[in-house]
Each structure stands twice: as structure tokens, then as C-alpha cells.
Image (cartoon, rainbow, N blue to C red):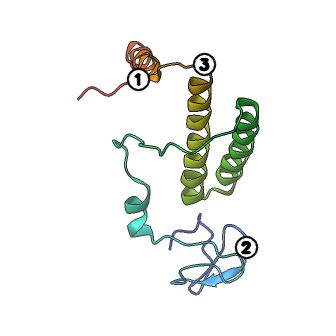
């Protein structure tokens, strides 16, 4: 089982979240509910390297940019905690939450100021191309 190198002797390992000893083969921690990922299946869970995110547009009626900025701070903190834990699944989940929150801020501002985002997406892509960050097909 993948468990952030917290392997103990005789078929037991420690939960990376709470430290409770669990049996190899357990699907999740009895104490905190942390879900373990089998080593041979980890790639199935974390690869989509070439996939572009297609985030849902939320109903943000009544939300403001300052409120959303506070939410972004919360999400950043959760990503930081996940990284500190060394929990790859939580890192991805919390990062997606952060991306969704940033994306919502972009849409709130665009709607508030009646801005067309297509121009900004094109300019952003061009900036990445000029810096050499884009993969050429």
C-alpha cells in the first residue's frame, strides 16, 4: 500500500494523517477515514498530465471579489496542509478546490466589469508560449 513511506514491520503501517497503526490491505484508516491507494494503482489516480481542466461555472450570484479572495486564502492553506502531510490525493483534491475558487474569482470580476474572457485566455496563452512553457504538439 502507498502510505507516505510509513511502513512498519509485520504487515502493518501507520496512517499518514493520524498515525494510527493499520493492516496492509486496509482500504482506509479506522480512526480518521484516510483512504489508502495501492501503489500499482497510484498512476490511475493521479495522471492526466495532458488533460486541460474543464471547470464547472458555479452560481456565484451575490458573491463579491473580496469574499472570494478570502476563500482563496482558505483553499491555499488547505493545499499547504496537504503538501506538508505528503498526501498526494489530498494535494490534488485541495489544488482543484483552489483552482475552482480562483476560476470563480475570474468570472465574478469579468461579470462585474462586463469583460470578455476570450481575450485574456489568448493573451495568457501567448505569454506562456513566449516564455517557452507550452508543450508543442
Quadrant in which the C terminus appears: top left
To which residue does mark 1 refer? 133
Residue at image coords 76%, 38%: 70
Q: Nearer the viewer, residue 63 or 26?
A: 63
**Vertical position of residue 119 compared to residue 6: above or below:** above
> Residue 115 in the image: x percent, y percent?
52, 18
Residue at image coords 69%, 42%: 76
> Residue 57 in the image: x percent, y percent?
50, 42
**Vertical position of residue 78 compared to residue 61: above or below:** below
**Vertical position of residue 132 compared to residue 89: above or below:** above
Q: Residues within 10 Å of mark 1 (few under 14, many from 20)?
A: few
To which residue does mark 2 refer? 19
Q: Secondary structure at mark 1?
A: loop
> Residue 64 in the image: x percent, y percent?
71, 33
Q: Are marks 3 and 2 in contact (CB under 8 Å)?
A: no
> Residue 18 in the image: x percent, y percent?
74, 71
Residue at image coords 55%, 47%: 96
Q: Is residue 33 left or right of residue 24?
A: right
Q: Is residue 14 left or right of residue 122?
A: right
Q: Quadrant of residue 130?
A: top left
**Vertical position of residue 3 compared to residue 95: above or below:** below
Measure the alpha-carbon separation of dots 2 and 1: 39 Å
Q: Nearer the viewer, mark 2 or mark 1?
A: 1
Amino acid at each position: 500500500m502507498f502510505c507516505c513511506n510509513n511502513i512498519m514491520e509485520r504487515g502493518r503501517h501507520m496512517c499518514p494523517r493520524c498515525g494510527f497503526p493499520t493492516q496492509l490491505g486496509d482500504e482506509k484508516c479506522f480512526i480518521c477515514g484516510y483512504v489508502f491507494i495501492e501503489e500499482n494503482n497510484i498512476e490511475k489516480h493521479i495522471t492526466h498530465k495532458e488533460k486541460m481542466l474543464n471547470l464547472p461555472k458555479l452560481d456565484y450570484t451575490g458573491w463579491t471579489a473580496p469574499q472570494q479572495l478570502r476563500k482563496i486564502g482558505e483553499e491555499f492553506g488547505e493545499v499547504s496542509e496537504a503538501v506538508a502531510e505528503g498526501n498526494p490525493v489530498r494535494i490534488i483534491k485541495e489544488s482543484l478546490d483552489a483552482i475552482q475558487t480562483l476560476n470563480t474569482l475570474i468570472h465574478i470580476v469579468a461579470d462585474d466589469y462586463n469583460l470578455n474572457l476570450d481575450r485574456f485566455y489568448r493573451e495568457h496563452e501567448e505569454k506562456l508560449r513566449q516564455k517557452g512553457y507550452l508543450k508543442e504538439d
